[in-house]
Amino acid sequence: MRAILVVNPQATSTTAGGRDVLAHALASQVKLDVVETDYRGHAMAVARSAARDGIDLVVAHGGDGTVNEVVNGLLADADGDPADIGHIPALGVVPGGSANVFARALGISADSFEATHQLLNALENDRSRRVGLGLADGHWFTFNAGLGWDADVVGRVAKRRGKQTTAALYMRAAVRSYFRPPLGRPPLTIRIPGEEPAEALTAFVSNTDPWSYLGQRAVHLNPGCSFETGLGLFALNGLGLPTVFKHVRQALATKSNQRGRRLVRHDDLPMIRIDAAEPVNFQVDGDLVGQRTRVEFFSVPNALTVIV
């Protein structure tokens, strides 16, 4: 088996020692090349080349941003339908970031050494899993995307974080973005096939649940959403403090089924379109992509094989 290990040395918890241990362990089972990323988009370029060169496995060692880049590289030629391009390398993940949402949702340990052991065991036993992905405005996402408040938070965090990204930093950014939204609160119109259009002020689209984490605490918005179902939608048409506190409390509950008169929520959707009256921030897997006035979200079942 030919494999490439993609390491982001700037990720929160990656270290040179951890990289060497991982590379040595993988090299015992596969023919391995190691690439350290040194610019934004580097991991995507490496994964795209790997897919075109017929590589069997690409392992991402970094945070959710690194995983997202690798996934977008692996599927760069898919044009929304992975079945059209034949062989796509399998994905392996060894977490090295702060949240590691995708890895945790797959049951991969947040500890890089334990995750390495899990990956080696899965390779030895030929164990893998097919997962569905989301596709939004040409960007593949593994766990979530959003327009409005959460994208404002992501953008604010991106400006302030160094190597360490903490739950407290995200909480401060959420509070600041709530009281001082950088682009205001343009209304959003949500369109779902077979449903009447719905209005909202912020919208989250999930590909799995939990949607995110605050430290070790899982955040649940669409408990019925998984890698085997369609997309989940969680949108609020009001952002008064009582509404926000209510849904934050429900989201942090262990077994919560979000309800509320300000809530627009659906699970297992094949497609969602969201229009904004004015440009709003748009994030994918925790990275700010830019500003949009329209985004179409699609669920793509069985898009990728993950070694797990």
Image (spheres, rainbow, N blue to C red):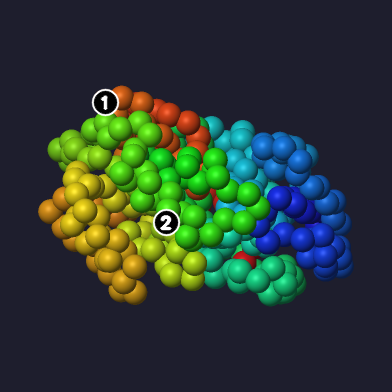
Residue 165 at x, y percent in the picture? 57, 56
Question: Residue shown at 83%/51% (left/top)?
Answer: 34
Residue type at the position of mark 2: Met
> Residue 18 location, x and y as percent?
78, 65
What residue is at 36 percent from the left and 51 percent from the top? 175
Residue drawn 34% across the image and 68% down it: 252
Is residue 303 among what the camera can see? Answer: yes
Give the label on residue 277, or none: 1
Please state, as top left, top right, bottom left or bottom right, where the N terminus lies in the image.
Answer: bottom right
Name which quarter of the figure residue 242 lies in: bottom left
Mark 1: give few (<14), some (14-19) or many (20+) Cα within 10 Å.
few
Toward the left, the furthest residue is: 261
Q: Nearer the viewer, mark 1 or mark 2?
A: 2
Residue 304: mark: none
- Residue at 39% x, 63% y is 219
Residue 103 image point, x, y percent: 57, 62
267 or 303, which lies in front? 267
Quadrant in the picture for the C terminus: bottom right
As displayed, is residue 298 above or below residue 209? above
Task: State the image coordinates of residue 128 (x, y, percent, origin top left).
Answer: 61, 64
In the rendering, which numbered label is found on residue 171? 2
Count how many numbered circles sit on residues in the image: 2
The answer to whether the residue labelled 1 contacts the one labelled 2, judged by CB atoms less than 8 Å apart, is no
Q: Secondary structure at mark 1?
A: strand
Give left or right: position of 219 versus 132: left
**Secondary element type, mark 2:** helix
Position of residue 98 in the picture relative to residue 58 (left or right): left
Q: Amino acid at mark 1?
A: Ala
Horizontal side of residue 287 vs 174, given as left or right: right
In this rendering, position of residue 121 left or right of residue 182: right
79 up-or-down from 254: above or below? above
